[in-house]
Image: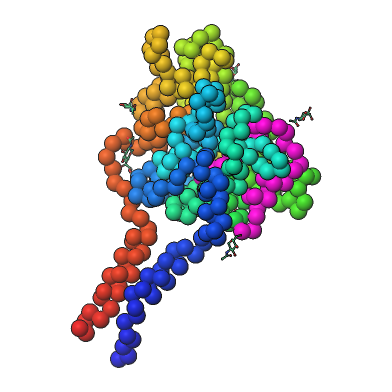
Amino acid sequence: MIRYSKPPITLLITLCLIFLHARALNETRMNAHLAAGAGLLGTFRDSTSWNLSNWMSAYDDSTPVQALSIPGTHDSLTWNVPAYVAPFVKTQDFPFFDQLNYGVRFVDLRIGILKGRIRMYHASYLLDSTAQLEDIFWGLYHWLDSHPTESVLVCIKVDNGNNTAALQRQVYDLITSPETSDYWVWNTTLPLLGQARRKLIPILRLVLSPDNIPDYQPVGVSVARGWRDNYPNITLTYYESTDGYGNTHSQQLFIEDLYNPQAEDEEAGVEDKFEALKTHLDLAAATAATPDFQTSWFIGFASGYNGLLTTPSELALGSTIPYTIIGVNPRVLEYLISKRGQYFGVIMFDYYGANLSLANATLGWDLVSGTSNVRSHTVVLSIVLVFWALWDYPYS
Ligand SMILES: *[C@@H]1O[C@H](CO)[C@@H](O)[C@H](O)[C@H]1NC(C)=O
Ligand SMILES: *[C@@H]1O[C@H](CO)[C@@H](O)[C@H](O)[C@H]1NC(C)=O
Ligand SMILES: *[C@@H]1O[C@H](CO)[C@@H](O)[C@H](O)[C@H]1NC(C)=O
Ligand SMILES: *[C@@H]1O[C@H](CO)[C@@H](O)[C@H](O)[C@H]1NC(C)=O
Ligand SMILES: *[C@@H]1O[C@H](CO)[C@@H](O)[C@H](O)[C@H]1NC(C)=O
Ligand SMILES: *[C@@H]1O[C@H](CO)[C@@H](O)[C@H](O)[C@H]1NC(C)=O
Ligand SMILES: CC(=O)N[C@H]1CO[C@H](CO)[C@@H](O)[C@@H]1O
């Protein structure tokens, strides 16, 4: 019997690491993007063992993305704004990377062009002096590399200036760039989870017109047309196809986006907002029990403000002065817990980090205890080490 000599352990580990990092992007460039985007991305922290950082691993590949209940953040990059603009500009309390680690899988990016580059805004407020849309995308690629079971829906909307041809070309080029296009789902409808893992799903709240883009190939889920402003029950068709027999299939999106109820005071504003969301969530749950569910998707916003009377923070979290008003978030949390097990669709939160029970409650999970996943790197390395250790076993 031929016996091969035991290979050096370093060789095995090196091969194993090369295999695990086969898809890694250019490290120099990655570091430059992470540095330029740090003011909005925050600091990347290895979180693979946190239960909520890989929650999609608990769901089957065959699950349609529109059938998942997904925590999202509204105006996801506003956590770091200076105090003087915070009252009406700040809508988040967690850095972007931490939102992802704590379960957020639908992010809301607001853009505009400044000196020829796409930059991040909330309304007309420039959120960071260096971060560009490309840096945020690279941050997402970096995060996906260490969370390969996950998928993130990336909603893009123009908040400052117009949706010019130049802007459309840049957004399109960033998504389709050969170097990174593998990180994106190209389908123009929502994919199955298995088709979306370790990828981003473009949710386009801006029109990308073939007239403005040379060699345009359809990409992304377009929700730009029909998204009525400040409205509680929008219905729009985000995908339509006709089969060989002339039958048309369409996919509907139901949206609750009453972001400014313009009620007479804070309490009435919170109540109007919560009622609109509750009506929407009830509809989502009811639809999930019918065949229509196959062609329906739901996005509800828990976020908003009330004219000049109530800031996003007050609407989400409530206030205690002059008397106690319970905000939208605790009310939604109570609702979600009471309806555990139901379908909720995507729920977009402000001040997501203030109570992380929102994450579990949106997923329909329990609020305490649970197991966390072992890191895939650790598993592969352990197998290699055991294999190496046992190499000569029967003979020595
Ligand atoms: C990575 O990118 C840098 C900067 O663009 C470039 O100088 C370098 O050659 C690239 N490295 C590889 C391995 O391609
Ligand atoms: C956006 O377009 C409108 C109408 O075409 C124009 O009036 C407006 O000045 C433009 N705004 C900016 C910021 O370019
Ligand atoms: C998405 O696109 C891939 C590749 O073209 C295809 O295999 C898959 O069936 C598509 N998914 C849906 C839901 O259309
Ligand atoms: C949608 O909301 C509008 C405005 O609040 C209301 O008039 C209408 O009845 C609602 N439609 C449905 C189907 O709930
Ligand atoms: C989060 O909400 C739960 C349920 O209402 C509550 O028990 C808990 O104290 C809250 N946690 C924080 C940090 O506010
Ligand atoms: C959410 O659920 C996980 C798993 O059950 C648990 O580890 C975590 O503590 C929970 N988080 C909250 C805020 O309840
Ligand atoms: C991905 C993962 O490990 N998810 C688990 C997190 O904890 C909840 C509650 O215990 C489980 O149901 C999930 O399977």
Can you tell me which quadrant of the image ligand 6 is in? top left
Q: Quadrant of the C terminus?
A: bottom left
Instruction: Give the answer, above or below, for where 286 lies relative to 308.
Output: below
Identified at 31% across, 34% down, the residue is 367
Identified at 59% across, 56% down, the residue is 180
Instruction: Give the answer, above or below, for where 28 lies relative to 124.
Output: below
- Residue 123 in the image: state x and y as whole percent: 62, 28
Which range of residues does the magenta coloring cover?
152-179
Asked whether 94 falls inside the magenta stretch, the response is no
Is residue 251 at all visible to an observer of this figure? no
- Residue 254 in the image: state x and y as whole percent: 57, 30
- Residue 370 in the image: state x and y as whole percent: 28, 43
Instruction: Give the answer, above or below, for where 117 lies relative to 194.
Output: above
Q: Nearer the viewer, residue 137 or 395?
A: 137
Q: Give the colour scheme shown.
A: rainbow
Q: Is residue 45 left or right of residue 305?
A: left
Q: Nearer the viewer, residue 47 or 346?
A: 47
Residue 11 in which image quadrant = bottom left
Identified at 47% across, 63% down, the residue is 21
Q: Quadrant of the N terminus?
A: bottom left
Identified at 58% across, 51% down, the residue is 184
Is residue 94 at all visible to an observer of this figure? yes
- Residue 266 in the image: state x and y as whole percent: 48, 12
Total residue callouts: 0
Check the image and name the residue furthest to the right. 211
Residue 390 in which image quadrant = bottom left
